[in-house]
Amino acid sequence: MKLLRGCWSQAKIATSKEKTRYFESYVSPLTDELDGQLHGHLFGFHDRTDEVRIMYYDELTGLPNRRFLGERLIEALDRAKQQIANFSVFFMDLDGFKKVNDTLGHEMGDRLLQEVSSLLQLCVGSSGVCARWAGDEFIVLLEDIQNRDQLEALAEQIIHAIEQLREIDGVPIHVTASIGVAIYPNDGSEGKTLLMHADQAMYEAKLKGKNNCCFYSADDYEQAQEQAQLQ
């Protein structure tokens, strides 16, 4: 018998407990070396769930990580450039997270990030992808919402939910969130530019008192650059 070159395929399966598992399968035909007649197929099966989670998900929060978000952003750009759908990006940073770490310890800081991640997912739902970017920074990629008023309403919902978080495991705690918003293609035609502009808008929100959201504005960015040069 001769084993011919086969092919791999991948599948993502959602279980009844709302958890996702990732599988990889392989199939190759078995033929007679003399007459080339097909005698069957060889099947292989591999559960890659743990590998995928390590590669694409944040260990602490369970949210998609920077690598996952980067790939989804490329896909969103491809769809947008084909005029299938536009999209927007939220860049969120917690106000007061360092104080929690310094006064209550890193373990409570980790618990706070977990609670914020859950709230973020609850607010966004199926409308987008929530990812942990770094430290206390989070990214939300939204393809199903493009209306500016709807984007602002969602950002305010997230901000309100985090502001209402008053205790964790019986320990009083309080942080707020600042969110910057960038919309394709007006605020950037590439993923890196959109993330940078959303980040800049987030810092503008902090400058305006924190606990709010700001949409990217080229004028605001130029003013900030001029002020930085004067300092």
Image (spheres, grey):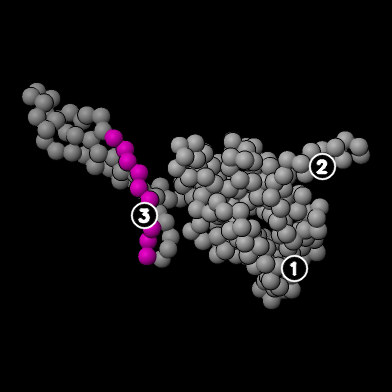
Q: Is residue 13 magenta?
A: yes
**Label 1 amino acid?**
His
Secondary structure of the residue carrying tag 1 is loop
Q: Which residues are magenta?
A: 7-16
Disc 1 + disc 2, Cβ < 8 Å: no
The residues bearing labels 3 and 2 have C-alpha atoms spaced at a distance of 47 Å
Quadrant in which the C terminus is drawn: top right
For the point 64% across and 41% down, which residue is it? 187
Q: Is residue 135 visible?
A: no
**Label 2 amino acid?**
Ala
Disc 3 + disc 2, Cβ < 8 Å: no
Quadrant of the image occupied by residue 226? top right
Q: Earlier in the sequence, mark 3 or mark 1?
A: 3
Quadrant in which the N terminus is drawn: top left
Instruction: Write down the residue under mark 1.
Output: 174
Q: Earlier in the sequence, mark 3 or mark 2?
A: 3
